[in-house]
Amino acid sequence: GRHFRLFHRREFCIEGNTDEMEETMTKPISPLLPIAYSKEVASAKQRGAPIVALESTIITHGMPYPGNIEMARSVEALIREEGAVPATIAVIHGTLHIGLEADQLEQLAQAKDVLKVSRADLAFAIAERRHGATTVAATMIAAERAGIKVFATGGIGGVHRGAEESFDVSADLEELGRTGVIVVCAGAKAILDIPKTLEVLETAGVPVVTYESEEFPAFWSRASGLRSPLTLNSPAAIANFQTVREQLGIDGGMLIANPVPEADEIPWEEMEIYIERALDSAERDEISGKEVTPYLLSTIFDLTDGQSLKTNIALVENNARLAAEIAVALAG
Ligand code: PSU
Ligand code: MN
C-alpha cells in the first residue's frame, strides 16, 4: 500500500498506510481524495469502536437555525451516551468530512451557500471545492467508504405523490439497494406516496424492518395504515439479520423504521391536513426537483406553528439512540 498523508487546513493531518486504513473500510478510498476524519472518529476507527454516521442535509435544508444545531448537538451527545461515536458527514471547502468538530458543526448550521448533495453531485461539491450537505444517499456512500455500518437520520427521501407524472423518486431508494449501510429512520413522510415508496424498496431488495411495531410509521405519526414488511424487537436481532445478509453475500442496505415516541407524535389525520395544504402551495409556487423536500418541510413547519419541528427533533433523537445500540451490537 502507498503511504499517504492528508492535510485539512491546519486542523487535521491524517497519516498512515493505505493497507492499514483499508482494512477497516468496506470500499477503498483513493489516497488522493481530500478526506478528513474528526479526532473522535479517527480514534474510534483505530480502536474498532462503534460509530454512527449522521447526514448533514437535515441540518442545512431540513430544519431552521437554531433548532438544527440544537438537534445536531443533542443527537451526537445521545450517541456518545450509548457508547458509540457520532460521525456527521459533510463536504466543507471541497473536503469530505467524516465527523465534524464542534465549531465546524456550528458553522455548517448557519451557512447559506451549501449544496444539497446526493449520489449525482457529491463528487461535484468536492471537485469544485464547495460546501455540500449530504443527503441519505450521499451519506451512505461516504459511510460505506469509511467503514461505518450504521447511520441515523429522520426521514428518507422516497416516491413523491404524483410521481407517475413528475417521475420524482429520491435517489435514496436506489442507494439503499446498493450500499451496505443500515439506515435508521422514522419511516417515510406522508408528503410522499408511502405505498409506492415501499414498492420501490422491495424491488430494490431493501429489507424494511419496523422496530417494535407491526405497522410502518409515517415520520410525524406512528401510524400509516400500512403493515410493515418486517418487524424486529431488539438491536441484537437487527445486527444478527445484517450479519446473515452479509454471510449470504447480499449487497445493499437495510432500512430500520423506528416509530416516533407516542408523547411526541402528531396524529395522522391532523398531519394529513397540513400536508395537503403544503402540497397545494408547492404546486402554486411551481417547486420542483431537489427543492421539493425542503420546501414542504418548511411550509409544514410554518403551518404547525413549529410543532412539526419539535416532533422532527424528538424522532431523530430516538433514531440516534437505536442506531447507537445497533452499532454497539454489531461491534460486540
Ligand atoms: N426528510 C426529512 N428531512 C430531511 C430530508 C428528508 O424529514 O432533511 C432530506 C434527507 O437528506 C433526504 C433528502 O436524503 O431530504 C431527500 O431529498 P430528495 O427527495 O430530493 O432525494
Ligand atoms: Mn426528488
Image: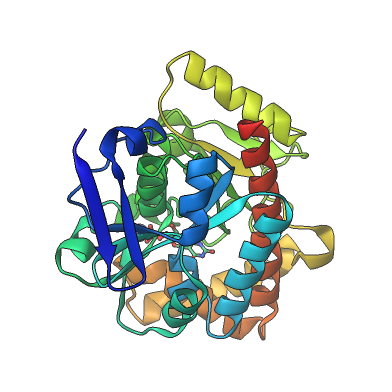
Q: Residue at x 18, y 38 (%)?
A: 2
Q: Residue at image x 60%, y 81%?
A: 67
Q: Is residue 157 above or below residue 274?
A: above
Which of the 4 quarters of the picture holds residue 301? bottom right
Q: Is residue 193 visible?
A: no
In the image, taking residue 313 as reference, residue 38 lies left or right, namely left
Q: Is residue 144 visible?
A: yes
Q: How is the image coloured?
A: rainbow
- Which is more toward the observer, 76 or 231? 76
- At which x and y percent is residue 188? 56, 52
Give the quarter of the figure containing the N terminus: top left
Which residue shows up at 17% across the image and 50% down it?
32
Marks counted in the figure total 0
Rendered location of residue 98, percent (x, y): 41, 57
* Residue 160 position by quadrant: bottom left
- Say if 133 sits above or below 28 in the image: below
User: Residue 244 location in percent, x, y?
Assistant: 56, 18
**Residue located 72% across and 69% down the image:** 270
Q: Quadrant of residue 263?
A: bottom right
- Give the percent coordinates (x, y) of residue 169: 36, 51
